[in-house]
Image (tube, rainbow, N blue to C red):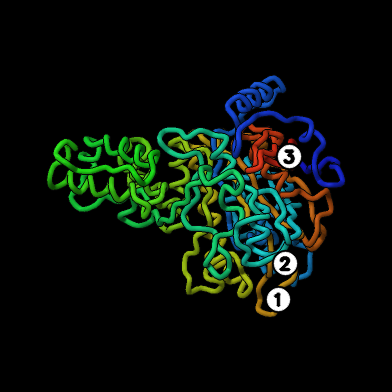
Amino acid sequence: MLGFWTNSERLCDGVNRREWLRVGGIGLGGLGLDALLRGRARAESEGRRVRAKSVIVLFNSGGIPHHETWDPKPDAPAEIRGEFGAIATRTPGLLAGELMPKTAMWTDRIAVVRSMVTGDSAHSTSGYQMLTGVPHVPLSRENAGPGRPNDWPSYNAIVQALRPARGGLPASISLPRRMANNNGQDPWPGTDAGFLGRQYDPWFLDCDPSLPDFTVPGGELRAGLTMARVGERRSLLDQLNARWTAGPDLRVEGGPDSGLKPGVDAALHSLERDAAFASYDRYRARAVELVAGGAARRAFEIAAEDEATRERYGRHAYGQSVLLARRLVEAGVSLVQVNWMSQDKKRPNGGGWDTHEKHNESLKGWLMPVMDQVYSTLLADLSDRGLLDETLVCWVAEFGHTPRFNARAGRDHWGRAFSIALAGGGIRGGIVVGATDKHAADPTTTPVRPSDYLATVFACLGFPPETIVHDAQGRPLPISRGRVLEELLA
């Protein structure tokens, strides 16, 4: 049965009172071990639990149009509702856009939030808010770059700081492309670790898992260097670690006592030395570790998937990236963010969700068929593998789209109201939180802020929003200033 929920009262500054009543922990730029242990013990004593072992975030940069997905308005005038109708879903009383028939069969596992608000209609700054839970200063600044005062860490980085690496893999990975501003030159603010420090930057992988020769990004082997030989020469990793710790004055040479042999050993030594020098940053060094690893490297061997599974996701970059995300959480990664990958740059709006022109054509022609297929397949695949109950799946974007069409038959940016969907680990499906007016222009219930959404994600991972991190000046700050959406939680 469909349930509708609204938010509880908040303080006038938007901050919950309880989050300022708890402080604890030490350690510049992150949590001290004692703080982590105390926080977990407190969570257990207060009845909290870790609902999700991992999170997959499908971040649809460009903006998901809520009118054609989670908040259709079938009774609105044509210039508002658009040319597409609404369909019934598996949840009685819940309507969805007609272009998502496969997703409609999974709504019993999905919670929809219809009253999301950023109050910002610029990609990079509204995106900053959805990635950090903190409003950008100033709002609605397109092509904004990272840096102070907008250096709050992304949720990816906070997870990197809170969760240990597992199975030789980092806690957080973002793929298959960087989230860039409109000019494509600089990344969005809020995509890095900000004041936490570079050591907590999430891994970013620029890759295309649909390619026949796909392997660990940045970890391709040079000619003549076999995986068997890498396995025999694991001392390489010790040398890399020593080089990383000691700095640029450390020398790793290939003299008579080095154990290196001509041929493939020379290639291995070359790889090791190249990775040690500044031209290879620490991410490349980590990729080398993956190449020499076992279970971690196997997570990237997407060719090991059976053909039927790969076809279900779609043999394109986006579908295979989401399949790779499933493999990564299965291998122990706590959070994987999959950024939308356009299918054809020659199409209107670059093939993406920023549908300023030919909105209906874009949705029906390629956007919604791909999204409906990939999203529903991910939920089904996780369910079949017994992973959906422990994997939180977030379908989000930086904002929605305008209620009215523009002169180019498109919908423009809209941060005043939009929808997101949460499913799986810790989420009670078949419910809707919030509502909008008859044109889906503004919330008619208390708005849900990005800080509330992220507080809920952290809570599912076992970290209450009052968990403390420290900035560069040692000031204690909660990981979220939002309210956990308890009505969503199972």
Q: Is residue 479 left or right of residue 55?
A: right
Identity of the residue drawn at 72% across and 54% down:
135
Q: Which residue is mark 1?
A: 406
User: Quick check: marks 3 and 1 in contact, CB under 8 Å?
Assistant: no
Residue 342 numbered tag: none
Picture quadrant of residue 304: top left
- Residue 285 in the image: state x and y as whole percent: 37, 45
Q: Position of residue 191 (x, y in %)?
A: 57, 53
The kind of residue tagged 1 is Asn
Which quadrant of the rendered structure holds the C terminus? top right
Say which residue appears at 69% left-offset and 80% top-offset: 407
Q: Tell me if residue 189 can be seen.
A: yes
Q: Amino acid at mark 2?
A: Thr
Query: Which label belongs to residue 485?
Result: 3
Contact? badges 2 and 1 (CB < 8 Å):
yes
Of badges 3 and 1, the one in the foreground is 3
Q: Position of residue 233 (x, y in %)?
A: 23, 37
Closer to us: 246 or 482: 246
User: Dot 3: within a 10 Å radius of its alpha carbon, few (fewer than 14), some, or many (20 or more) residues?
Assistant: many
Q: Mark 3 falls on what kind of element?
A: loop
Name the residue: 78% across, 43% down: 4
- Amino acid type of the residue tagged 3 in the rendering: Leu
Residue 436 position by quadrant: bottom right
Q: Which residue is mark 2?
A: 402
State the SS at label 2.
loop
SS at mark 1 in the image: loop
